[in-house]
Image (tube, rainbow, N blue to C red):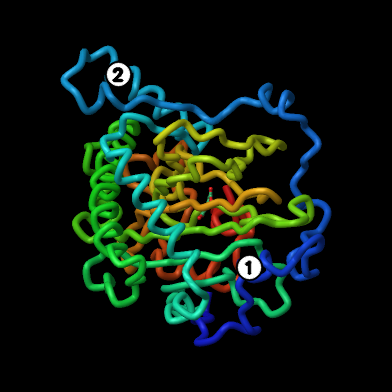
Amino acid sequence: MKNSPQEEWPEPIIRVQSLSEACVDSIPDRYIKPPTDRPSFSSSPDDDDVVSNIPIIDLHPLFSASDPAARASVLAQISDACRDWGFFQIVNHGVSPELMDKARDTWRQFFHLPVEMKQQYANSPKTYEGYGSRLGVQKGAILDWSDYYFLHYLPLQLKDHNKWPSHPPYSREVVEEYGREVVKLCGRVMKVLSVNLGLEEDRLENGFGGEEVGACLRVNFYPKCPRPELTLGLSSHSDPGGMTMLLPDSEVAGLQVRRLDTWITVKPARHAFIVNIGDQLQVLSNAIYKSVEHRVIVNSNQERVSLAFFYNPKSNIPIEPVKELVTPDRPALYPPMTFDEYRLFIRLKGPQGKSQVESLKSPR
Ligand SMILES: O=C(O)CCC(=O)C(=O)O
């Protein structure tokens, strides 16, 4: 894509949080989705129980000196989940529950600060860093019912504490510690994903640029919405990066994962992370692993906070299917592309289902 990111948003930014406080029983037209994209709230809670959840995998056997059979079973569960679902939850993953709660609470407090304090960090489409309320710069686009905060954790040269909120007062320390622990966990999961493809354990990480991988955090804030049946907190998309480690709200569900023609509402397990394969891992694995569409619904009773930690390739190296997974029977499905080039799509157009990664596929 030739376009480069522009300096300013195409229209004045309105914070969804302020709309939520002002709107009693209607929402502005800009947030009303076309009927085909609206969520369905037809199922009763009982029906919902019939719908399956994404796999929940206990990582304990991986991280302890347990028996080889238990370890092999965890590897197999992760392998199936990456190939079939593109999504899974992990428990006993090694990140402390207290740190997870503290990170989420800190960000909830940030979003409840007076608007003038948050405005100091208002972002622009050039880098997206800071406090934002839209993805994409298409004038007149239908917007999502959420605000967010986006920041870089890795590589070190992009990490700038001045671009992170200084309130609540200890927030930078919390984000530092949370980032350190989640990066460690992502590294461990990447090894499993590599081994499950029959590769050396560092192969995928090296494909991402080894020591120079990227990592960034988007904290999503979904205010209460008086007409949740008309809109979405986040439109359907697949994640452009490598792998996402999502900390969902502990009380409020909202994430929906596409499974064939239905949307499955994820029921988060306590202190679990939700892991999903991003487009770059679909590319590196030559589509053995699936980057799956997902979206977020909102509700009228409760706000929702989630922390999406994106573990990404170094942004200026070509990403293409790893050679070991390219065979005469299964030629490379994607041409090489850097992540910098790749992520321009979502940065310009906003969330658009799986259209980008699908459009790259070479004709066979
Ligand atoms: O809020 C969620 O549960 C999902 C967020 C998400 O998909 C994203 O930030 O890309």
- Residue 256: name its quadrant: top right
Q: Nearer the viewer, mark 2 or mark 1?
A: 1
Q: Residues within 10 Å of mark 2 (few under 14, many from 20)?
A: few
Q: Position of residue 82 (x, y in %)?
A: 45, 34
* In the depicted structure, whether residue 207 falls above or below residue 89: below
* Residue closest to the eye, 237 or 284: 237
Q: Position of residue 281 (x, y in %)?
A: 41, 47
Name the N-terminal-most of marks 2 and 1.
1
- Residue 109: name its quadrant: bottom left
Give the amino acid at mark 2: Ala
The kind of secondary structure element at disc 1 is: helix
Q: Is residue 229 left or right of residue 123?
A: right
Q: CA distance from mark 2 to mark 1?
A: 46 Å
Q: Residue at x 67, y 35 (%)?
A: 260
* Residue closest to the eye, 134 or 82: 134
Q: Residue at x 58, y 44 (%)?
A: 255
Q: Position of residue 306 (x, y in %)?
A: 48, 51
Q: Residue at x 30, y 34 (%)?
A: 93
Q: Is residue 161 left or right of residue 137?
A: left
- Residue annotated with mark 1: 16
Among all residues in the image, which is located at the extreme bottom?
Answer: 7
Q: Which mark is residue 135?
A: none
Q: Residues within 10 Å of mark 1 (few under 14, many from 20)?
A: many
The kind of secondary structure element at disc 2 is: helix
* In the depicted structure, whether residue 275 falls above or below residue 51: below
Give the amino acid at mark 1: Val
Q: Position of residue 73 (x, y in %)?
A: 34, 17
- Residue 23: name its quadrant: bottom right
- Residue annotated with mark 2: 72
